[in-house]
Image: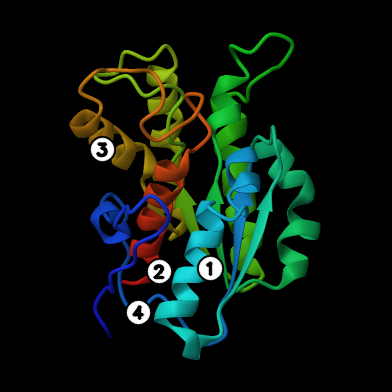
Amino acid sequence: MRGPLPLFTNGGLFLAAALVGCAASGHFLHQGERIVFLGDSITQLGVKPNGYVTLIADTLQIRYPELGAEVIGAGVSGNKVPDLQGRLRKDVIDKRPTLVFIYIGINDVWHWVTPGLKGTTKEEYESGLRQIVAAIQQSGARVVLCTPSVIGEKRHGSNPEDAMLDEYSAISRRVAQETGSTLCDLREAFIGYLDSHNRSDVEKGILTVDRVHLNDEGNQFVAGQMLKVLEQ
């Protein structure tokens, strides 16, 4: 299999430098891949010109044009795990994907501290993820399950929601392992990157615009993490 090829995107970030934190085994990409990215507003914004979904689609076309891979964004703002369950048939299964990335969990945590909203209990989060993964696998598609990334970019666990995010990330890791899904550990990758690059310990502006949603560098970073999975 060919090695990773350099790719520079707007802002000059070398995507290959971001390829840490995610793992897969074997040759992951196949002819005629149809890849759905399922998630919340981070994924909804990911289909914009500089978004991570678009960056992945463009990179696959450049590096592997012979595969004819198709990339589909399925992000909806405000979504939590129960919302994904409700629209899984229409937005994922009916698209007949061969591979599905699930990037969810931020709102499941964040809505616990957002006035007028309610988060997802850990029990509902885990059972919902398991049902989503099972339905996708039963349709014949493979699953890449991502841990939730960040609500705040301060280092050393000093963001208010860090402890809860770590708990939900641990659930995602366990579900990935026990369902035979591939894990893309965005939580771990973000923490490692911010520990090295956020020396001023600011709460936003390194990979996010508002503590959660990705800036250009963040989109490139997430694209790099997911491309590592696809290029194993």
Q: State the residue position of label 2.
A: 230
Mark 4 vs mark 1: which is more N-terminal?
Answer: 4
Q: Nearer the viewer, mark 2 or mark 1?
A: 1
Mark 2 vs mark 1: which is more N-terminal?
Answer: 1
Circle 2: residue type? Leu
Crowding near the residue tagged with mark 2, few <14, some 14–19, many ≥20 C-alpha atoms within 10 Å: many
Tell me what residue is drawn at x 28 percent, y 74 percent: 5
Identify the secondary structure beneath mark 2.
helix
- Does 46 sit above or below residue 203? below
The location of residue 198, given as percent across then percent down, is: 25, 26
Circle 4: residue type? His
Q: State the residue position of label 4.
A: 27
Choose top left, top right, bottom left or bottom right for residue 172.
Answer: top left
Circle 1: residue type? Ala
Q: Which mark is residue 200?
A: none
Q: CA distance from mark 2 to mark 1?
A: 11 Å
Report if the CB atoms under discs 3 and 1 are less than 8 Å apart: no
The location of residue 146, given as percent across then percent down, is: 45, 47
Q: Nearer the viewer, residue 209 or 224?
A: 209
Q: Looking at this rendering, what residue extends furthest in the front direction?
A: 11
Whether residue 177 is visible to the viewer of this picture, yes or no, is no
Q: State the residue position of label 3.
A: 193
Report if the CB atoms under discs 2 and 3 are less than 8 Å apart: no
Q: Nearer the viewer, residue 147 or 217?
A: 217
- Does 83 sit above or below residue 3? above
Exactly how many numbered labels are in the figure?
A: 4
